[in-house]
Image (cartoon, rainbow, N blue to C red):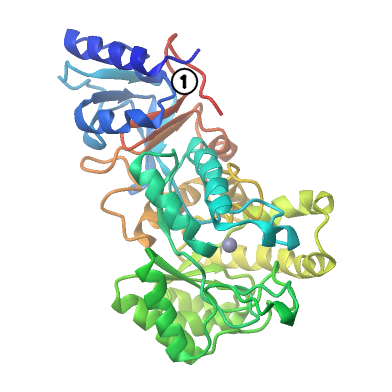
């Protein structure tokens, strides 16, 4: 059952006017036209069996959280607050957690779309693909993402559409086109010379790089993404080699920081990781061939590692059915075992980690698998959860508003049935999602619970 808009608003008004606590009324999958209404007036009380506090790294019993509009105004334990004019969402014994954060997504592209077929996708089409994937990502419990690399600024359009309430999806930081060298991982080498095609973020030499940083900021980038090394899905380059020179990286990062933007870099080779860290990059994405020297350097500079580990496992299982080009398969065969070994080493050494999934190279909505794969490679479930909440919030510069369920923070919460610290796989089956105080998914409470439409 799904309540119609007018019916839902009427019920809400009656509830508020009567000043009663009515369980289940907020259970409907809320379409986004309600977002403004919810932000401005509604008080909601959320109760659950446990709350994961990523700051303390532990579970707290019987939380009672008061949400007014899009903010958390109080977090108490056991004692219900004296608020009377509020909607109650009673999640029973479920575990409540801060909304998850993914700092490495590709919402505007689909798995398997990177080859020749991808050349036929227009920017408007990419934005619409993004609308579909934004919804899947939000319903999987990821209330905030950082999208790293999109041609034509389709990610800027998506971010703005979500913020305007036109489509539903996570809160976003976006990069626009990723910067890279001619013929590198962030260019596109599928077409022959006579097409004279190069990707929008291509820039060679310090001056061109500086110009490109300013340009992507002009058109809406919140964060700068660049390619320091070769990669897997790029034809004709080598992940074991560096692409940007140390000098170009320094200019790129210095200019981005000067203009108030953080910098994320795709870096596979050991030398590219070290040069990017030395140049002051904020996060190393993938870090496949990270060596001991690189680990020490990352710890010294407090650089975040974004391991994107779930695709390593996903590809082992699904690559054979994807009919990928032979050069992708050849690179994967080298990269997957190296990445698993080196990520495990980095986790053990205590490099700071922010969760990033690379969703888009595999299907969207499976982002929760990253918690499982990081645990598979040696993290504790608590550390994995911290990397997808407080750490990711810090990397995004939003630690004051997201990443924890605390007074004054944005009301982004998810819940699962059971204890994810004993079964991390539960995080792949989120059953309650609230973003900005609006409920987008609730399979946990009350007889009025309506199935989310998906
Ligand atoms: Zn990526």
Question: In this rendering, is residue 103 above or below 252?
Answer: above
Name the residue located 33 percent from the left edge and 49 percent from the top edge: 55
Where does residue 139 sit, x and y in percent of width and height? 50, 35
Q: Describe the element under mark 1 as helix, strand or loop.
A: loop
Name the residue located 55 percent from the left edge and 44 percent from the top edge: 133
Camera-side residue of 417 and 100: 100
Where does residue 36 sit, x and y in percent of width and height? 27, 33
Which residue position holds label 1?
A: 444
User: Can I make out residue 167 in this image?
Assistant: yes
Question: In this rendering, is residue 445 above or below 170?
Answer: above
Question: In this rendering, is residue 443 above or below 191?
Answer: above
Where does residue 341 sit, x and y in percent of width and height? 67, 66
Q: In the displayed structure, does residue 81 sit left or right of residue 319?
A: left
Where does residue 81 sit, x and y in percent of width and height? 18, 22
Camera-side residue of 295 and 259: 259
> Quadrant location of the C terminus?
top right
- Give ligand 1's quarter of the image: bottom right
Name the residue located 61 percent from the left edge and 84 percent from the top edge: 242
Name the residue located 58 percent from the left edge and 70 percent from the top edge: 287
Q: Residues within 10 Å of mark 1 (few under 14, many from 20)?
A: many
Camera-side residue of 404 and 63: 404
Q: Image quarter for residue 268?
A: bottom right
Camera-side residue of 274 and 204: 204
Count of marks, rendered view: 1
Q: Is mark 1 within 8 Å of ligand 1?
A: no
User: Can I make out residue 107 in this image?
Assistant: no
């Amino acid at each position: 059952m799904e309540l119609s808009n007018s019916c839902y608003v009427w019920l809400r008004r009656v509830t508020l006017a009567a000043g009663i606590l009515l369980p289940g009324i907020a259970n409907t999958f809320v379409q986004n036209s309600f977002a403004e209404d919810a932000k401005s007036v509604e008080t909601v009380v959320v109760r659950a069996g446990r709350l994961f506090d990523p700051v303390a790294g532990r579970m707290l019993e019987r939380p009672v959280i008061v949400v007014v509009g899009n903010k958390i105004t109080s977090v108490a334990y056991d004692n219900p607050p004296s608020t009377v004019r509020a909607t109650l969402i009673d999640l029973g014994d479920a575990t409540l957690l801060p909304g998850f954060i993914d700092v490495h997504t590709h919402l505007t592209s689909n798995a398997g779309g990177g080859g020749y077929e991808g050349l036929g996708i227009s920017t408007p089409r990419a934005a619409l693909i993004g609308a579909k994937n934004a919804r899947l990502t939000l319903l999987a419990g990821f209330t905030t993402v950082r999208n790293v690399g999109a041609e034509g600024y389709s990610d800027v359009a998506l971010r703005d559409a979500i913020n305007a309430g036109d489509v539903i999806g996570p809160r976003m930081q976006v990069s626009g086109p990723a910067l890279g060298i001619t013929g590198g991982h962030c260019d596109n080498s599928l077409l022959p010379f006579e097409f004279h095609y190069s990707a929008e973020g291509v820039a060679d030499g310090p001056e061109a790089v500086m110009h490109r940083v300013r340009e992507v900021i002009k058109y809406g980038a919140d964060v700068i993404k660049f390619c320091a090394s070769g990669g897997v899905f790029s034809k004709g380059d080598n992940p074991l080699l560096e692409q940007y020179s140390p000098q170009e990286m320094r200019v790129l990062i210095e200019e981005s920081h000067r203009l108030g933007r953080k910098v994320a870099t795709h870096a596979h080779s050991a030398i590219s990781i070290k040069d990017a860290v030395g140049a002051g990059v904020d996060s190393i994405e993938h870090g496949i061939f990270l060596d001991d020297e690189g680990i020490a350097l990352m710890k010294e500079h407090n650089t975040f590692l974004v391991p994107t580990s779930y695709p390593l496992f996903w590809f082992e299982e699904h690559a054979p059915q994807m009919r990928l080009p032979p050069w992708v398969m050849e690179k994967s065969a080298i990269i997957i075992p190296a990445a698993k070994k080196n990520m495990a080493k980095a986790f053990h050494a205590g490099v700071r980690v922010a969760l990033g999934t690379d969703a888009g190279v595999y299907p969207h909505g499976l982002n929760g698998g990253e918690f499982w794969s990081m645990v598979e490679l040696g993290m504790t479930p608590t550390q994995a959860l911290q990397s997808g909440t407080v750490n990711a919030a810090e990397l995004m510069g939003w630690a004051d508003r997201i990443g924890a369920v605390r007074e004054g923070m944005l009301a982004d919460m998810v819940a699962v049935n059971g204890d994810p610290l004993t079964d991390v796989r539960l995080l792949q089956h989120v059953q309650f999602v609230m973003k900005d105080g609006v409920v987008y998914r609730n399979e946990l409470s009350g007889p009025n619970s309506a199935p989310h439409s998906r």
